[in-house]
Amino acid sequence: MPTTRRGDERRRAILRRATHLASVEGLEGVTLGRLATELGISKGGLQALFGTKQELQLAIVGAAVEVFQERVLDPAERAPDGLPRLRALLGAWIDYLEVFEGGCFFTAAAAEFDGREGPVRDAILLLALAAHDLAGTHVRLAVRLGELAPDTDADQLVFELHGAILAANQARQLLGRPDALDRARRAVRDRLDRAAAPA
C-alpha cells in the first residue's frame, strides 16, 4: 500500500540521520527526544515508529548493518575468490570509514557497549563476529589456493589487518590525520605481500 511505502521511506530517512548522529554522539546520545529535535518532528511521532529507546537503538544498529552490507560486503563479493576478494573486502572496509560523520559506526558503538549486556551489545557483537569470520574465511581460502603461505596463521593475520583498520579510524577521527586511510591501505597491502606464498 502507498501509505506503508511512505511510512517505510520515512522510517529509513529517520534511521539514516540517526545512524550518522549515533556515530558522532553515541547510541546513548540518540534519544527519542534528541532525534525529534534534530529532525524537527514530534517525539510522539518517533515513539509511534520506534517505541522505546532500546528499540530505536536496535533499529539504528540494524540500519548500520545494512550500510556495512551495501558498502563493504556486497562489493567484496563481486571480486574473485581468494586473495582478490580478501583485498576487495579490506579495501571496501577502509573506504567505509568515511561513510558516517563519526567514522566507523561499529567501532564507536563497540567502545560504548562492550562492557554492557543486553540486546544492543549482542547486535553489535554479531556484526563484529561476522566481519571477523568472513575475513578469516577469505584468508584460509587464499592459503588453500596457494596465494598465501601455507604456514599462515589466519587468526593472527586477521587480527593485524583489522588492527590497521581500527588504527586508521582513530587516526582519522581523533588525531585528524588526513593520510590515515592511505596509511591503512599501505599497511594492508604490505602485510598481505609479506604473507604471500613464495613464487
Image (cartoon, rainbow, N blue to C red):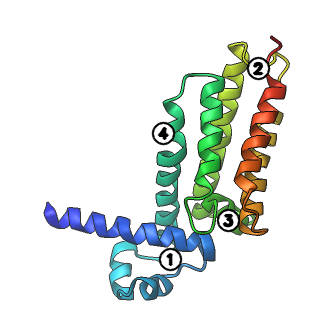
Q: CA distance from mark 1 to mark 4?
A: 30 Å
Residue wearing tag 3: 108
Kind of residue at badge 1: Lys
Q: Is residue 117 visible?
A: no
Q: Is residue 171 visible?
A: yes
Q: Are the two marked residues, 4 and 3, in contact with CB atoms closer than 8 angstroms?
A: no
Identify the mark nearer the N-term, 3 or 1: 1
Q: CA distance from mark 1 to mark 2?
A: 46 Å
Question: What's the mark number on residue 53?
Answer: 1
Identify the mark nearer the N-term, 2 or 3: 3
Q: CA distance from mark 2 to mark 3?
A: 32 Å
Identify the mark nearer the N-term, 4 or 2: 4
Q: Are the two marked residues, 4 and 2, in contact with CB atoms closer than 8 angstroms?
A: no
Kind of residue at badge 4: Asp
Badge 2: how crowded within 10 Å, few (<14), some, or many (20+)? many
Give the label, 4 or 3, closer to the camera.
4
In this rendering, the answer to whether 81 lies above or below 62 is above
Question: What's the mark number on residue 4?
Answer: none
Badge 1: how crowded within 10 Å, few (<14), some, or many (20+)? some
Question: What's the mark number on residue 74?
Answer: 4
Kind of residue at badge 2: Leu
Residue 48 x, y percent position in the rendering: 33, 78
Residue 5 x, y percent position in the rendering: 22, 62
Element at label 4: helix
